[in-house]
Image (spheres, grey):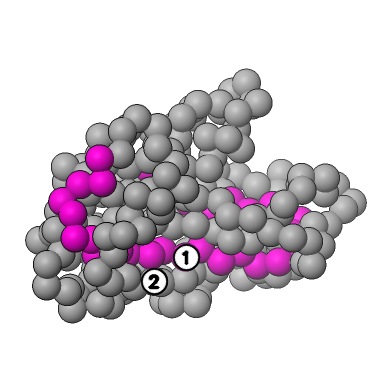
């Protein structure tokens, strides 16, 4: 099975159109367009009854001490943890493409609704739900896709791994505010094939001079 995208190339930078945050010369970070990328796939194995699509960033700092702090930098050698940006399950077996913006075309403070999603699919909460838990203006359950917004002072360029799973069940029977970890546990014994596509993103202007130039133009 192969996964491809018209929105970005494998192991190349993700355009800010698909991000939650973009570089801002005055305030470090500004809200971006937050469209979900386009994806298509083929060579689906026989017996596929549904698909799941999960996006995670494996490069999130394990400690918040230096995150977005003036005069400090998140060191590249700091231990990293997973952050889920999209948990989408129960996609129909005859589906071969997800259009840009079909599941997200902007930022919703306190999160988009769920778990019901377009195409009769279901989507879980992403990790912004816990990230914003103590933020008075942004706290809530963030269902569906919300794109990259890594620390603006991180010395590491983050990776965003989109993985499509072909499954031998029509539904994973996940209910309510299920998480990326919940979905991965549910699919363990049902995977017929999987394919991944990785994009990169940074809000650190020293690592992304082209991004800061385009944003401040």
Residue 209 image-quadrant placement:
bottom right
Q: Which residue is mark 1?
A: 161
- Report the quarter where the N terminus lies: bottom left
Q: Is residue 106 above or below residue 73?
A: above
Indicate which disc, 2 or 1, sits on the residue closer to the N terminus. Answer: 1
Residue at (17, 74) in percent of width and height: 45
Q: Which residues are magenta?
A: 144-173
Q: Which residue is mark 2?
A: 196
Residue at (83, 45) in percent of width and height: 65
Q: Position of residue 21 (x, y in %)?
A: 56, 49
Residue at (56, 66) in percent of width and height: 159
Is 168 a magenta residue? yes
Q: Is residue 96 above or below residue 117?
A: below
Q: Position of residue 171 (x, y in %)?
A: 20, 47
The answer to which of 108 and 168 lies nearer the viewer is 168
Asked whether the beta carbons under mark 2 and mark 1 sit within 8 Å of each other, the answer is yes
Q: Position of residue 148 (x, y in %)?
A: 53, 54
């Amino acid at each position: 099975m192969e996964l491809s995208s018209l929105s970005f190339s494998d192991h190349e930078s993700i355009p800010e159109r698909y991000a939650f945050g973009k570089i801002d010369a005055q305030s470090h970070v500004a809200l971006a367009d937050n469209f979900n990328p386009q994806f298509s796939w083929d060579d689906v194995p026989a017996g596929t009854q549904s698909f799941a699509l999960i996006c995670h960033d494996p490069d999130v700092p394990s400690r918040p001490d230096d995150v977005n702090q003036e005069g400090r930098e998140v060191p590249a050698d700091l231990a990293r943890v997973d952050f889920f940006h999209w948990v989408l399950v129960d996609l129909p077996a005859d589906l071969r493409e997800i259009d840009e913006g079909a599941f997200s075309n902007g930022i919703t403070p306190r999160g988009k609704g769920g778990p019901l999603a377009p195409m009769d699919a279901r989507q879980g909460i992403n990790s912004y739900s816990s990230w914003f838990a103590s933020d008075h203006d942004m706290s809530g359950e963030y269902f569906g896709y919300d794109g990259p917004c890594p620390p603006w002072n991180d010395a590491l360029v983050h990776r965003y791994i989109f993985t499509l799973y072909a499954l031998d069940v029509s539904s994973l029977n996940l209910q309510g505010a299920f998480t990326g970890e919940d979905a991965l546990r549910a699919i363990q014994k049902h995977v017929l094939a999987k394919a991944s596509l990785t994009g990169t993103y940074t809000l650190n202007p020293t690592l992304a001079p082209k991004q800061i130039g385009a944003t401040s133009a």
